Image: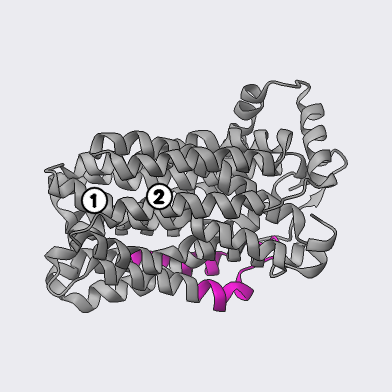
Amino acid sequence: MKGELAVKGALSWPFLRLYALTLLYFSANAILNVMIPLKGEAMGASNTTIGVVMGAYLLTTMLFRPWAGQVIQRHGPIRVLRIILVVNGVALLLYAWTGLGGYVLARVLQGVCTAFFSMALQLGIIDALPEEDRSQGISMYSLCSYLPGIFGPLLAIGMWQSELDLFAVSMIAIAVLTGAVGYTARIERQPEGQSLEQSGEAGSGRTGRPAAAMWRSMTRLATHPELRRCSLIMLGASIVFGAVTTFVPLYATQVQGGSAALYLGLQAAVVVAARFTLKGRIPSDGRWRPRFVGGTLAMMTASALAIGLADQGGVWLFYAAAVLMGIAQALVYPTLTTHLSFVLPKAERNVLIGLFIATADLGVSLGSIVMGPVADMTGYAAMYLICAGIGAAVMGVALLRAGSARPAAEPGPGGGSVL
């Protein structure tokens, strides 16, 4: 894609079509994030059970994400995309016609699809755009993945209150539309991507053994300082994000005047607005910006604290938290991803970014699976105060090596980087 697409930039028509596909794909999850907790509570499920059902999605995504990066390198994104859109359609049909037990299988299938879908689109964007446009492309992708969060919660509440089975109809409609748009999308494999694949295989000395290559890549979490730092920050931040997404629909009833749909819609609207207005401020030169990252995480920490105090302090804390959390979500992921796209060795970049994204998936999953039992034992308010403590910890990680900021790494003779 580094010909016509790169010249026209991140807002050219081929990229806009990919962003539209992203919006449709994630619309289902925006509805499910509200419907599954509400249906689970109505069926008498505990927070632990609801957390497991919700967490199964991104836990599966995390496990398949590194493998997805290698499969896409070998077979090309468009072929993989068409297969996973069929599987995604099957998963959405399970939501339409099964109960809470069937939702677990549907979440697992959807998690596999999301691993390949997001990797195909994000790696395509990174490989296609010049360095100065890379952060804009990543931000636009992330923006479109969050945009359904504005209208999704409102639609879910409307479906929940309606006597008609609109939930099943919506899942079927999204499955059909996503498949139609996805089959018309085009993502061309680039010469750079092919050379990376070849150099990666040559460097490993083992062709056709993706499991061994994946294991070697995982060791980079310990040996590569930038990957380790960004992954720790993303893991902690994602735990907070996951706890908010899963349990705010249930916690909102304990806040006088609180509305889960309004909170989630406001938070998503802030994410979209911040991604659009602040995308030019996201560093795109490979240097580490401790104050920028630390300040963003401080907003996330303050938001979790405000949510935990909202049942006693009032609804204004609840909605102020939505604004702060939205800004934090808008900035953390694209900032860290863009930074890594510069400092990681080029021969391993795709797989290592997949590994980094897997830590985000793991964090969101833990925010559901682990914080569910915590909420059962301590209540929602105390659980969110614990999330604030996690936020403070990762803020410390971002600031710990404030003097280590440095220019982007230059490629070494073997395709790696000089750190």
Residue 392 falls in image quadrant: bottom left
Q: Circle 2 sits on which residue?
A: 172
Per the image, is 386 magenta? Answer: no
Q: Residues within 10 Å of mark 2 (few under 14, many from 20)?
A: some
Q: Position of residue 16 (x, y in %)?
A: 65, 65
The magenta span reads: 274-301
Q: Quadrant of the N terminus?
A: bottom right
Q: Circle 1 sits on which residue?
A: 37
- At horizontal 35% and vertical 64% (from top left) the residue drawn is 301
**In the picture shown, does residue 273 fall above or below 5?**
below
Q: Is residue 38 visible?
A: yes
From the viewer's side, name the closer residue of 387 and 270: 270
Label 2 sits on a secondary structure element that is: helix
Q: Residues within 10 Å of mark 1 (few under 14, many from 20)?
A: many
| Dominant SS type (magenta) | helix
Marks 1 and 2 close (CB-CB < 8 Å): no
Q: Is residue 325 visible?
A: no
Label 1 sits on a secondary structure element that is: helix
- At horizontal 27% and vertical 43% (from top left) the residue drawn is 51
Q: Position of residue 378 (x, y in %)?
A: 14, 49
Q: Which residue type carries mark 2?
A: Ile
Q: Which residue type carries mark 1?
A: Pro
